[in-house]
Amino acid sequence: MTSKKKINKKDIAKLLSEWSQEFTVFVPWRDEGVAKWAKWDGKDASFLDWYRNTIVPPKAIFLPPVEGMFSFQKGKEGYHIELPPSDRRKELIFGIRPCDAKALAILDMIFSDTYEDPYYLARRKNGVLVGLGCVNPYDSRFCTSLGSSPTDSTNVDLMLTDVGDELLVEVITDKGKELMTKTSLAQAATQADEARARGEREVAYNKVTRQLDTKDIEKKLLANFDNKDYWEKIAAKCISCGICTFLCPTCYCFDINDELIKNQGERFKSWDSCAFPLYTKMPMENPRAEKWRRLRQKVCHKYEFYPINFDVIACTGCGRCIRLCPVNWDITQTLDSLPTKEKVKLEK
Ligand code: SF4
Ligand code: SF4
């Protein structure tokens, strides 16, 4: 289902006000120099001028860094448990980039697998994604090597493409169709608008110059799994800060803890990272005490284990881990430098 409209950029604030009647609207926001997602303030749509992508990905809306699961109270007859209110408002993410929408689709797979996560899934069910094509992608981005593009509309409900003073609007899903019935600000797009959008998409695609050869990547990683020399070299400069995992839109590891004061408390989950030495600590051993094992886990999880389980590489090529790593560790260099046939026999 695809039908096209357009909306003037000057009307975006009005549009967001209309949608705010029903949804909690999130937009890109600058907070002390850091671009992240925030509830719209009801006025400012200037993000359209400066926004390239947020540092903190939109997974933080669906999988908050810290989230209460339930509170509990210990009484004479055992524990009384109270769940958080379930009548949450619907959330609308305005301007999500295609790579981050794809990341949510990747997270959906794990959170709806054997152990469903009701907290994440409830938010996703109620959420609406309004995508905005990425016309000025960062140099670190390599989404086109992973089957996507800066204007990929696959995982959003509505897709917007910047065509100068206006945004071309494509309805992608039923949710997107319903959203467009809640506004009268859009007009029918002309063939000239559509031709312009096609041109912008091509320009944006060609701006992604970083490439990664993913052919046989799972086999190469499997063949190098025990290549300690290689992984030690790759991990040498990593300082195990965890930034690349916290800010990766497809990383989802979390810890669960109880906070207890006398007889009452709260159980909460919080982001965790396989980059931390304590992450896999168990009473008798720690299978990833050494840094190279942890970095290997991160790379193999995304490019080997996830494809085996879900048939998709759990990396969108958003480039955050490259752009934001304090020691310039680069996942594309890591994968490009995997020893191949000369040193390692690939499976036939
Ligand atoms: S961001 Fe860089 S230094 Fe920090 S854990 Fe990741 S690879 Fe290591
Ligand atoms: S591994 Fe890096 S490039 Fe891939 S999705 Fe995560 S942050 Fe983005």
Image (tube, rainbow, N blue to C red):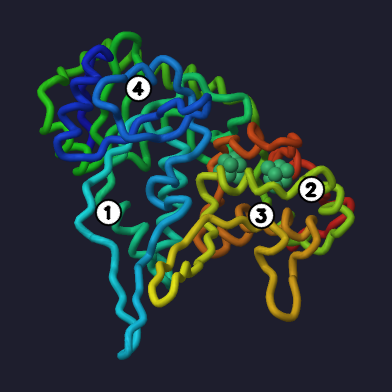
Residue 282, position as x, y percentages in the image: 68, 75
Residue 19, position as x, y percentages in the image: 18, 32
Marks 4 and 2, how far apart at CA: 37 Å
* Tag 4 secondary structure: strand
Residue 257 to residue 210: above or below: below
| Comparing labels 4 and 1, the label whose residue is closer to the camera | 1
Instruction: Give the numbered dot on residue 176.
Output: none
Quarter of the rendering containing residue 70: bottom left
Q: Residues within 10 Å of mark 4 (few under 14, many from 20)?
A: many
The residue labelled by disc 1 is 125
Marks 3 and 2, how far apart at CA: 15 Å
Q: Residue at x 37, y 28 (%)?
A: 132
Residue 66 to residue 55: above or below: below
Dot 4 or dot 1, earlier in sequence: 1
Pick out the residue farthest to the bottom: 77
The answer to whether the residue bearing label 3 lies less than 8 angstroms from the nearest atom of ligand 1 is yes
Q: Residue at x 72, y 61 (%)?
A: 277
The three-letter amino acid code for the residue at tag 2 is Leu
Dot 3 or dot 2, earlier in sequence: 3
Q: Residue at x 60, y 35 (%)?
A: 319
Taking the image in four quarters, ligand 2 sits in the one at: top right
